[in-house]
């Protein structure tokens, strides 16, 4: 069945353009697009001038299956993703037990396909049990469908183990995603070191821990030639090392969490645990450095780092509370703050949200080109709303944006040309 989307402002991150036009979908694929008179089509949707962009490819989504289904399931996460314009979730392996065998990976893949309305690509653990001592069967897991390999926030402290695993990953062309932190310095930290941390009396970590972790990782990448992605940079002091690695031609990319682009350490305020994330929120200077790095392309990818936590794990003293925030539904409106503030344009934003993560994973989506999958998001750039965490589709409600005024609403999300959110909009 063909579907024609007319009167849409097309955001093309490849061409770096935004133009008013139309887009034709045929059998789940983008068949054509243009700015002239649209072709005739029985199933036509007038987009009302709203913005049409490639669906978001979100790397690093935490799902509670198996082990923590009470925090998030594939069904609830899939609904949240669709409502947030995320058409592909790349899920983390930090489950209970960890996804470190082909059988476990096949289980979550089957569950995801049954329950989620969006694409789900699972990552696998890089070492068994994410314990950092013995690498997993990388070749078998890659054949079973692992999109990438990561121990998430369990940093592999033993450089010999890490280098051997990187060498094997290089031999099979696997992508390794790491969390750059010096594990000794960052252990037990709740906030970033500085005057604010001292005044609050909270255990803190220096931003230098991130630089030290990244420098170690990049040295091992240079030695092994592996494909490497730093999942969540957050400090200005780490950026020169990333720039040197890219200038040297290493196969390296980097991402940043939406919370580190839009919040800073002062938002913690009076010990508000919904603002406790990992790594901790940084200074305003660091936040602005991250925004600039995205704008220039030094940082390639923006992700939600969606980490659901239940009420019991968040309603604790700040030092003891669990880290993380849900963000599948807030990723886009929070990112649009950067657009409204004139810090970044829409094509650059969707390069970081859609095009670059798709390319890094070897996917065909993330584009508005003919022949690309019709995974799309239609959104109203200027629609204001007050965020109520209890309206979120995620099973857990731990968002730092609760009660905040936001601007930018998803009107419709399409996966392979089918509306998975906003079908009522399509029928109007």
Image: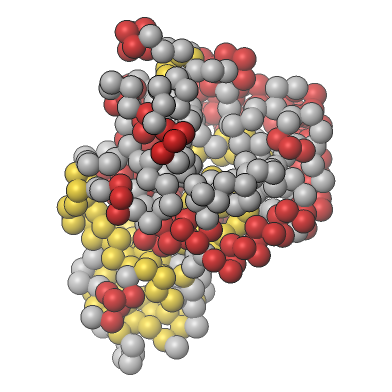
| The C terminus sits in image quarter | bottom left
Q: Where is residue 348 in the image (x, y as percent from the top left)?
A: 37, 48
The answer to whether residue 170 is visible is no
Q: Residue at x 36, y 60 (%)?
A: 83
Closer to the camera, 307 or 19?
A: 307
Relative depth, front residue between 170 and 375: 375
User: Which residue: 82% across, 46% down?
Assistant: 137
Query: For the point 38% across and 41% down, which residue is it?
Result: 398
* 333 is higher (above) or lower (below) than 159: below
Does residue 368 lie above or below 355 as drawn?
Answer: below
Name the spot of residue 111 as percent of width and height, x first: 62, 63
Displayed quadrant of residue 161? top right
Quadrant in which the N terminus appears: bottom left
Q: Pick the residue in front: 371 or 382.
A: 382
Q: Which coloring applies here?
A: secondary structure
- The residue depicted at 27 percent of the width and 70 percent of the height is 8
Measured as percent of width and height from the top left, residue 6 is found at 27, 77
Q: Where is residue 146 in the image (x, y as percent from the top left)?
A: 69, 53
Q: Quadrant of residue 420?
A: bottom left
Q: How many marks?
A: 0
Residue 403 visible, this angle: yes
4 up-or-down from 20: above or below: below
């Amino acid at each position: 069945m063909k579907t024609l989307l007319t009167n849409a402002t097309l955001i093309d991150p490849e061409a770096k353009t935004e133009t008013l036009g139309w887009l034709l979908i045929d059998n789940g694929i983008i068949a054509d697009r243009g700015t002239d008179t649209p072709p005739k089509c029985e199933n036509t949707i007038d987009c009302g001038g709203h913005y049409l962009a490639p669906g978001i490819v979100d790397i690093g989504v935490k799902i509670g299956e198996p082990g923590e289904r009470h925090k998030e399931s594939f069904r609830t996460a899939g609904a949240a993703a669709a409502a947030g314009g995320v058409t592909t979730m790349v899920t983390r392996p930090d489950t209970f037990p960890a996804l470190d065998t082909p059988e476990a990976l096949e289980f979550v893949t089957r569950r995801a396909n049954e329950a989620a309305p969006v694409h789900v690509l699972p990552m696998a653990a890089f070492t068994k049990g994410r314990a950092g001592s013995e690498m997993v069967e990388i070749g078998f897991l890659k054949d079973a469908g692992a999109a990438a390999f990561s121990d998430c926030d369990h940093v592999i402290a033993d450089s010999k183990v890490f280098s051997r695993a990187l060498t094997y990953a290089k031999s099979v062309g696997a992508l390794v995603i790491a969390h750059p932190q010096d594990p000794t310095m960052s252990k037990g930290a709740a906030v970033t070191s500085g005057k604010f941390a001292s005044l609050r009396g909270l255990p803190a970590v220096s931003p230098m821990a991130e630089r030290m972790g990244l420098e170690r990782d990049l040295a091992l990448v240079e030695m092994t030639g592996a494909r490497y992605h730093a999942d969540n940079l957050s400090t200005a002091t780490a950026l020169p090392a990333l720039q040197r690695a890219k200038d040297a031609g290493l196969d390296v990319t980097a991402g940043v969490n939406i919370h580190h682009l839009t919040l800073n350490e002062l938002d913690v305020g009076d010990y508000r645990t919904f603002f406790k994330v990992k790594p901790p929120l940084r200074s305003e200077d660091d936040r602005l450095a991250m925004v600039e790095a995205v704008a220039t392309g030094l940082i390639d990818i923006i992700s939600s780092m969606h980490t659901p936590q239940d009420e019991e794990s968040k309603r604790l003293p700040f030092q003891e509370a669990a880290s993380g925030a849900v963000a599948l539904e807030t990723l886009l409106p929070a990112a649009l703050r950067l657009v409204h503030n004139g810090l970044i344009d829409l094509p650059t934003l969707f390069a970081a949200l859609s095009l670059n993560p798709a390319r890094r994973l070897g996917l065909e989506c993330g584009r508005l080109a003919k022949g690309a999958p019709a995974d799309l998001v239609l959104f109203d750039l200027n629609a204001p709303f007050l965020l109520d965490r209890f309206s979120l589709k995620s099973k857990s409600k731990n968002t730092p944006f609760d009660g905040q005024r936001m601007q930018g609403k998803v009107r419709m999300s399409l996966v392979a040309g089918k509306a998975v959110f906003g079908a009522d909009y399509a029928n109007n």
